[in-house]
Image: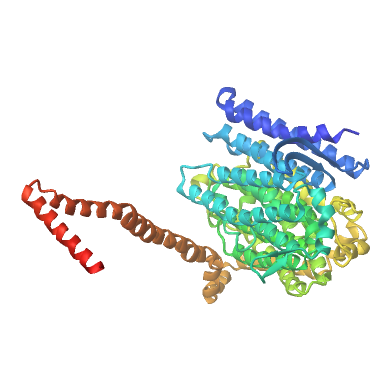
Amino acid sequence: MFDLKPLCLLIVLNPLGAALVIGLFGKLIGRRASHWLAIIAVGVSCCLSLQALKQFMWDGAEAVNFVLYQWGNSGSYHFEIGFLIDRLSSWMMVVVSFVSWMVHIYTVGYMQVDSGYQRFFSYIALFTFGMLMLVMSNNFLQLFFGWEMVGLMSYLLIGFWFQKETAIVANLKAFIVNRVGDFGFILGIAAILYGFGTLDYRMVFDQVEGVVASNANLFFTGTTSTPLITFICLALFMGAMGKSAQIPLHVWLPDSMEGPTPISALIHAATMVTAGVFMLARLSPLFEYSETALTVVLIIGSLTCLLMGLVGIVQNDIKRIIAYSTLSQLGYMMTAMGVSAYPVGIFHLTTHAFFKALLFLGAGSVILALHHEQDIWKMGNLKKYMPVTYITMLVGSLALIGFPLFSGFYSKDLIIEAVGLSTLPAAQFAYPIVLGSVYITALYTFRLFFVVFHTQERMESKLISHLQESPAVIWVPLVLLAIPSFVAGGILLDPLFQNFFKNSIVIHANHSVFNILQAEHQGALQMALEGFKSSSFWLGMSGILTAWFCYVQSPAFAADMQRKFSLLYRILKDKFGFDTFNQWAIIAGVRGAGWFCWKVSDDWLIDGIGVNGTAKSINRISYMLRKIQSGYLYHYAFVMIVGFLALLVWLMLTE
């Protein structure tokens, strides 16, 4: 058995070292050395992460919590870099490093002619380092460091093609929206320090029961207060809403498609957007003490699941359809967290990482073959030209809709069942939403699949003559991702229900949803067989049939429905007005406030009355005094006489 302390240091420092070397000396060492350095570094991290997971899964290893070094002091508080390696973090380390590794390999083929080749590899390696720091941290301040690191790298990668104005707008949008969520996140961290006197996970978790028992409150006014734990959880969830793109802070994620396809896969599959889901699982000892916070998580998650799936139905950009799919699936994960089924939420995070990375990289294979065309209505019948991409995309699509035996089936059906079993009042609202979203998921997924691979060819004739399967450096990662997209769910299901996350995730007895699922578990094969009789299966099949009828069998029917329901279509095309509201209410309001501060506060008050006004007043007074200083003796004598007479009058009146 390996010592986990040096192991975890190697895992996190490998991508950092590669990023620094490539970033500083990439031009010197060249393209080939740069990509090999990044691929080997992340590959080693992946292998070591698998070794750490193996030790927890089969060797009975105990969690390791240690401080690497102390970098600052403030009063009695010590700022530290430390690591917590337990079952939850080792699981996440494997997911992050494996998907990142596949993306690194894929990038060699996708970005081979790009002038920023070395810069891109430096960025994605640093992105991987930031995510590993996030999941391996043992304190809230280091969590925040990793949180901001992936936020910074997403900003740089979304705007990687900075010559495009749309890319600059998209990365600024991602940065600003995440600042809104991060404001709540840092407030939550400050409240933890205020209430617990420490930011160390274990110390906070050990104290939480006592803090709740003491009825600790935060007072906003003399009479208005809220329980400290509830405030902390809601503030932290605000941060999760930004990173994991929950409504209304979801608007940045679809626009992140402006970055190269490999970073779309990295952001959407296993890194940035899953950070919020991981954070809620890690902080389950806090969230379990606030049903108010859990209810908010449940409602926001279920609404995101439904509304973003509906928007995905009317998108025509192949990457945006998959992006809205990510939003909807993140809603499923958050819904699981809201009903205290944390292990199930992490399970869906894991399966989703594989099949969503597969779908994005498959879309990238299509885009590359069509010379960067992304409109699905300018594609068609690609199964004839790209058989490997076709088969792997089919595997990813079936996993996404939750077809029995595929990995997404196990995790998604468990979430739906968990919501149905929950005793939270909001679960009655959420259950029909997450169940109905199965139909919507199948509809937009197979709309994309049928239009791109099965309908008539709509490409330009000069493209058709050169169409062929992508090179091996692109399709090999697709195959490697397709394997876990098919089998990972069934393989990981048994460890999930054998309390793999014990001591890492806390679930209270009155939130017993996962315990019920555990008691009913009869094995992966039995669950899949039962799945063919479930309502979610038939809803999924209905969605596939609807997509086939509307876009393959009778395209005129879809166009007719679009005309008949034009109002609903416009609402969906407008994405429920979230961007419009932000543009006309928030952005216009901020710009209006800025104009007011400029014209009234700065221009009129400070400059007009203060700075310039003072100068003008002195100038006027000086002008008047200058008139008195004429230089004529009789003028001065006259003033002296007038002054003397005024003094005499004043003395007479005051007697």
Task: Name the residue at 83% across, 65% down.
Answer: 532
Q: Horizontally, is 648 left or right of 478 in the view? A: left
Q: State the image quarter where residue 336 is shown.
A: bottom right
Res. 327 visible in picture: yes
Question: x, y (%) of residue 24?
Answer: 58, 28
Task: Name the residue at 18% across, 52% down.
Answer: 625
Residue farthest toward the front in the current orientation of the protein: 655
Q: Nearer the viewer, residue 298 or 179?
A: 179
Q: Horizontally, is 566 left or right of 441 in the view? A: left
Q: State the image quarter where residue 329 is shown.
A: bottom right
Question: x, y (%) of residue 202?
Answer: 82, 48
Question: x, y (%) of residue 137?
Answer: 75, 43
Task: Name the residue at 77% across, 32% down.
Answer: 10
Compared with 39, 299 (above or below) is below
Compared with 623, 299 (above or below) is below
Tag count in the figure? 0
Q: Horizontally, is 106 left or right of 1 in the view? A: left
Image quarter where the C terminus lies is bottom left
Res. 410 visible in picture: no
Q: Nearer the viewer, residue 414 or 217?
A: 217
Question: x, y (%) of residue 214?
Answer: 81, 63
Residue farthest toward the bottom in the current orientation of the protein: 564
Task: Name the residue at 54% across, 70% down.
Answer: 571
Image quarter where the N terminus lies is top right
